Amino acid sequence: MQPAGVNPPDGNASGTTRLGWSDSLRILYPYFAENFMEQVRSVWFIVVYLVVFQILVLGLPIVYASMIGVGIVIVAVGLMFFMEGLRLGLMPLGETIGAVLPRNSPLPVILGFAFVLGLGATFAEPAISVLKAAGSGVAPDQAPLLFSLLNDFSGQLVLSVGLGVGAAVLLGVLRFFYGWSLKLLIIPGVLILCGLTFVLNLDPVTQPILALAWDCGAVTTGPVTVPLVLALGVGVCRIVGSGESSNAGFGIVTLASLFPILAVLLLGMYHYQAKDYWGAENYTGSAAINAPAAAAGDESADGRSMITEEEFARFVENPDALGELNIRFEGGQPELRDGEIVLTNPTVVLSRPLVERPAMISDTQWDGSKSILQGLADAMLEALRAIIPLCLFLFLTLRLVLREKVQRLDEITIGITFAVLGMCLFVLGISLGLTPLGSQLGSNVPGTFAAITPWGMEGIEGPLFESDNAGKALAALFGFFLGYGATLAEPALNALGNTVEKITVGAFKKKLLMQSVAFGVGLGIAAGVCKIAYNIPLAWMLLPSYLGLVILTLVSSEEFVNFGWDSAGVTTGPITVPLVLAMGLGIGANVPGIIDGFGILALASVGPIITVLLIGRVVAGRQAREGTSAPVRETP
């Protein structure tokens, strides 16, 4: 206490202590250092694992290593500011609305807010920027509808994803109001998606969009959408007071993963019927955008270098002008004559062999000479477009609809500033660090079973093994440990493990859940690598998986269904999504005959649901043998 009659040393009669810049930095440094290290802990395993695999296993150097290193540091700094901005700025607004809106507003207003919240949160997701840039390596002549969705209709694609999330949040709120079982929403939704997937898989034009649509479900459940919609869900549950508080918050994440898939499939079907995609009769877009393979005009769908009109004219003059060609006979009447097979009236087809050095994804997806300042300006513009409209919507809802004062406005303003700055740095770091690292390794992984041109290098390397199957098995093993380790590093998984252990009162241990989810993600990514390496249609892998999940869901308890299906959402964090997506596109670009590299995220999402529900059946069976029932704790 200041003695009576004695002024403070600085002459300030109010007793307020003024801190200089150095004192302020000393106080803030431990706080920011701790938050920065938290982001480093979530990214270090993935980065070290990728670098070690490429250098020690593939025997290839990291190209642009210094730039990639700077980009990864920028990602960590960006995530630090972004997550802190969410905590200080967006989350207080969302939690206040979640607590006040259900109490003061009729159901139609709540549903309208839920829809717009889901839509706006999707645009603010950091990973959505990766989806916008994912069409660079798709050849329009091989996948015309997929090419148009990612290029000509990219705005519609992102909007459809947002509309899907908005519809999911709306339906999730209705579920809380009326106490619907999550099974009643999941099972019909999955069956509809499986039916659409089966039908679209039959058409070669619509088949390539399946992997994109199912991957979109993984992009939506990120650090913006999940906390905001959970805040709304918890607020609704508290007001409704249905007695099922143990399930508060669960289910919306699952619906927010399924509905965007449906929205993208419907968007693709619309443009397929309208015939306004690349090459169709009503197409009016620019085929020059991101169309390297179409511009070259020299590669077929199965990876062969196609013969041009000019080359055909040279062949007519000199049959040896094109070098060695593959010869194939079509039709004709075969017969055995004097120990020889004789074909009468066959059609002889000459074609080039498979391309040994496919185009590198790095040529179209990443430019090492791009100006960092220009990239920073683009990232800032994208961050402002994503964050500011969502914040304005939350603020106006609080002031104009709910007539509530905004508490701690100065703190919220700082938080929003942090969120914009963080997202700006994150997007810049992704383009400089994680995207080239994922593309580089993805492009080089096929070197385990095929001859490739290494990313950013010249010449031909590989394969490491004479046996294709041995090399593909190593690539799949690489995918498994990548998914397993990256998942254990996700902070959201740790939080989910704590929640599940409390809800089940220790019946499902936190460690067991984390291991189950990580193992499922690892299996999913390994299956995705095999899908690309062996050119397996995604529908053949997804349909049995999800139909099996329908059966598992029917025989599982409501509690296990709730957190089992939501476990897929925690595996697709802001680091995992862009890295796995870039890696998948990189692998697809270097495997002859592969149109794209989508689908790995879809399989990485279904894997943990299967493993968690299976382990849940084991836990339930053990309790049944011991004569106890699965306890469920109701949280306040």
Image (cartoon, helix red, strand yellow):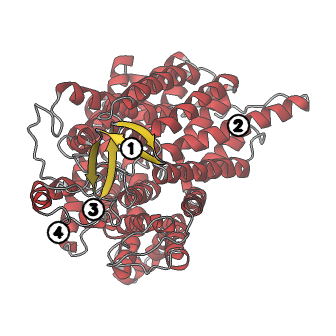
Mark 1 and mark 3: span between their CA atoms? 51 Å
Task: Report the side of 472 relative to 430 (left or right).
Answer: right
Q: Nearer the viewer, residue 337 or 194?
A: 337
Kind of residue at disc 3: Gln
Question: Could you tell me which secondary element the residue under label 1 belongs to?
Answer: strand
Q: Residues within 10 Å of mark 4 (few under 14, many from 20)?
A: few
Disc 2: which residue: 614
Which residue carries the number 3 mark? 365
Q: How far across and down, in percent of the image, does residue 11 sit?
A: 34, 80
Distance in Å between CA atoms under marks 2 and 4: 49 Å
The kind of secondary structure element at disc 2 is helix
Closest to the camera, between mark 4 and mark 3, is: 3
Mark 4 secondary-structure assignment? helix
Select label 2 or label 4 by which is in front: 2
Neighbours of disc 3 within 10 Å: few (<14), some (14-19), many (20+): many
Residue 409, above or below 436:
above
From the image, tell me which residue sits under label 4.
374
Kindly tell me whether residue 211 is visible in this rendering: yes
Q: Earlier in the sequence, mark 2 or mark 4?
A: 4
- Give the side of residue 82 with respect to residue 43, left or right: left
Could one spot residue 11 in this view of the protein?
A: no
Q: Secondary structure at mark 3?
A: helix
Going by the image, does 238 lie left or right of 360? right
Q: Which label is found at residue 380?
A: none
Q: CA distance from mark 4 to mark 3?
A: 16 Å
Q: What residue is drawn where x is 37% and y is 21%?
A: 105
Q: As displayed, is residue 27 above or below residue 561?
A: below
The answer for how far apart the CA atoms under marks 1 and 2 are is: 58 Å
Query: Is 90 left, or right, of 624 in this rendering?
Result: left
- Mark 1, mark 4: which one is toward the viewer? 1
Q: Which residue is mark 1?
A: 342
